[in-house]
């Protein structure tokens, strides 16, 4: 007898006919007291089990309810019905875990359409739904492809710390990590502030907002490195694009200028999307049907012009449009959209930070293509970005995607100590704290670049989903940390 995952068995197809097999899984449905649809999570597809109820105890049949788990042994036969190539003529069933039909009613395991909101409320059940199961397998495939890409291209995977003393982005959106007993009075210093020198690490520490600064350290010895880990932001933005805990991929490369950085970002995105298309055909078929149907229910002006698979193919086969921030502002300023005051945040001119609506306008309406914006005003970007000769823009780049807005943010780094110091002073970034970061510029500094890709934004794009909470197992957002 052969043990199979449902995926492997279905992939064998007719080759498996006449084999005696064992499969295990969860019941998706049981109809006519005869046909069980069984799923084990290895694939979105179910295997059909055929039960001759005359040969089974009523006691067992009674327990074959939706969501129950079971082990079935039987012979693979060619399917009589349409819809599937093979099925299993069951000889033996062992119920592994029962499912209470009364309690099932209120769960998302009940086989009918449920809203994504309801799925989120039952995040412990949603791995068993078609939609979330498909998303998780695509997410897995993308993560694997990311590692594969960097591995094949000579990058060293380094782990940067999760607990850190620095604010890499200088945006102050950090979660403090402390071992103080918060029920008691906290030790205070002479200025009356909390005295973190008495805390566990002897200093103020926080959860990392980015592994970049430490990745730069590693790149200054290893050449090409990347980090891939959880990142935390205490930004109180309740949007469909922000999480308080998300996963970020951050490559960092010595001897790379901004053009090389852009080339790498574009090449990597294309590689990992192509990998998912090739390796997740069933899941992407399901998700694209879902996406395409969803579009038809939206008002015309909110619809995506391309179907999901067309959109993915478009990204693979077209060059991303590259333009400077300055050019982008001109386009936005002169756009009908702006003149008709259709932006929530009107374009006020050079120097303003772009909002998601502006980024999406450029990508979805103007260029109809992924876009890389570069050379942003220094004032709206982080302290570590390399200053251009014009003295007012920095070598920053943002990759913007349809339906998403910013998917990647990166830059060439400021490798000149004097320029970096001046910037740190201007922005009030502590030189004392980042002495080690400054040290990199004292001993064999080199031009170098890197970027950060938000994994969940990539999964959103590939799966055609609209809310970032639906592409991570247990989302962390303001006022929400259930499970
Ligand atoms: O643009 P960000 O803030 O850049 C950095 O953190 C740099 N240190 C990266 C680097 O150069 N090594 O974040 C990078 C990406 C964004 O483009 C976005 O995809 C994602 O991380 N991101 C978020 N994803 C989900 N929720 C949030 N709150 C996110 N903030 C950023
Ligand atoms: Mg950014």
Image: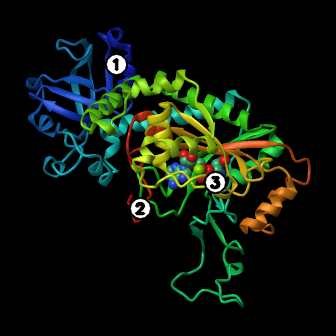
Quadrant of image for the N terminus: top left
Q: Residue drawn at (37%, 43%), measured in percent from left and top?
A: 466
- The crowding category of the residue bearing disc 3, from other C-alpha atoms within 10 Å (few below 14, some 14 to 19, many at least 20), is many
Q: Nearer the N terminus, badge 1 or badge 2?
A: 1
Specify whether tag 2 is near ligand 1 (CB below 8 Å): no
Q: Is residue 442 left or right of residue 60?
A: right
Residue 340, percent from left and from top: 39, 47
Q: Residue drawn at (83%, 58%), measured in percent from left and top?
A: 438
Q: Mark 3 points at which residue?
A: 210
Q: How many marks?
A: 3
Q: Name the residue under label 1.
A: 10
Q: Nearer the viewer, mark 2 or mark 3?
A: 3
Residue 213, percent from left and from top: 72, 53
Tell me how far mark 1 sits from mark 2, CA to CA: 38 Å
- In the picture as drawn, the residue positioned furthest to the right comes out as 443
Q: Residue drawn at (38%, 40%), measured in percent from left and top?
A: 465
- Quadrant in which residue 309 is drawn: top left
Q: Name the residue under label 2.
A: 481
- Quadrant in which residue 3 is drawn: top left
Q: Is residue 427 above or below residue 62?
A: below
Dot 3 falls on a residue whose secondary structure is loop
Quadrant of image for the C terminus: bottom left
């Amino acid at each position: 007898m052969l043990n199979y995952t449902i995926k492997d068995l279905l992939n064998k197809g007719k080759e498996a006919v006449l084999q005696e097999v064992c499969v295990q899984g969860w019941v998706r449905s049981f109809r006519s007291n005869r046909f069980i649809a069984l799923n084990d999570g290895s694939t979105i597809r179910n295997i059909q089990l055929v039960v001759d109820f005359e040969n089974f105890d009523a006691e067992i049949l009674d327990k074959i309810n939706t969501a129950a788990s079971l082990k079935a042994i039987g012979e693979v036969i060619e399917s009589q019905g349409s819809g599937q190539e093979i099925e299993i003529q069951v000889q033996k069933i062992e119920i592994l875990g029962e499912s209470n039909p009364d309690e099932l009613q209120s769960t998302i395991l009940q086989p009918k359409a449920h809203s994504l909101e309801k799925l989120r409320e039952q995040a412990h059940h949603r791995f068993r739904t078609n939609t979330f199961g498909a998303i998780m397998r695509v997410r897995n495939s993308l993560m694997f492809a990311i590692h594969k890409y960097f591995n094949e291209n000579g990058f060293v995977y380094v782990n940067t710390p999760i607990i850190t003393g620095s604010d890499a982005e200088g945006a102050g959106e950090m979660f403090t990590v402390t071992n103080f007993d918060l029920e008691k009075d906290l030790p205070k210093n002479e200025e009356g502030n909390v005295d973190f020198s008495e805390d566990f690490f002897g200093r103020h520490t926080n959860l990392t907002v980015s592994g970049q600064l430490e990745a730069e350290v590693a790149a200054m010895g290893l050449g090409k490195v990347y980090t891939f880990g959880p990142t935390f932001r205490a930004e109180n933005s309740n949007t469909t694009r922000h999480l308080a805990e998300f996963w970020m991929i951050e490559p960092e490369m010595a001897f790379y200028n901004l053009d090389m950085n852009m080339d790498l970002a574009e090449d990597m995105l294309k590689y990992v999307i192509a990998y998912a298309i090739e390796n997740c055909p069933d899941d992407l078929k399901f998700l694209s049907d879902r996406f395409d149907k969803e579009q038809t229910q939206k008002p015309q002006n909110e619809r995506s012009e391309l179907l999901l698979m067309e959109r993915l193919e478009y990204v693979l086969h077209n060059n991303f449009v590259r333009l400077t921030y300055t050019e982008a502002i001109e386009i936005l300023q002169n756009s009908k959209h702006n003149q008709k005051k259709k932006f929530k945040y009107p374009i006020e001119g050079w120097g303003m930070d772009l909002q998601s609506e502006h980024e999406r306008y450029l990508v979805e309406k103007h260029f109809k293509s992924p876009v890389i914006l570069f050379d942003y005003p220094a004032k709206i970007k982080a302290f570590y970005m390399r200053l251009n000769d014009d003295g007012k823009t920095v070598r920053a780049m943002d990759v913007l995607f349809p339906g998403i807005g910013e998917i990647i943010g990166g830059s060439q780094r400021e490798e000149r100590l004097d320029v970096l110091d001046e910037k740190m002073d201007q922005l009030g970034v502590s030189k004392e704290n980042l002495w080690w970061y400054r040290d990199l510029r004292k001993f064999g500094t080199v031009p170098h670049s890197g970027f950060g890709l938000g994994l969940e934004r990539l999964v959103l794009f590939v799966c055609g989903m609209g809310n970032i909470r639906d592409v991570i197992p247990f989302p962390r957002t303001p006022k929400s940390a259930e499970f």
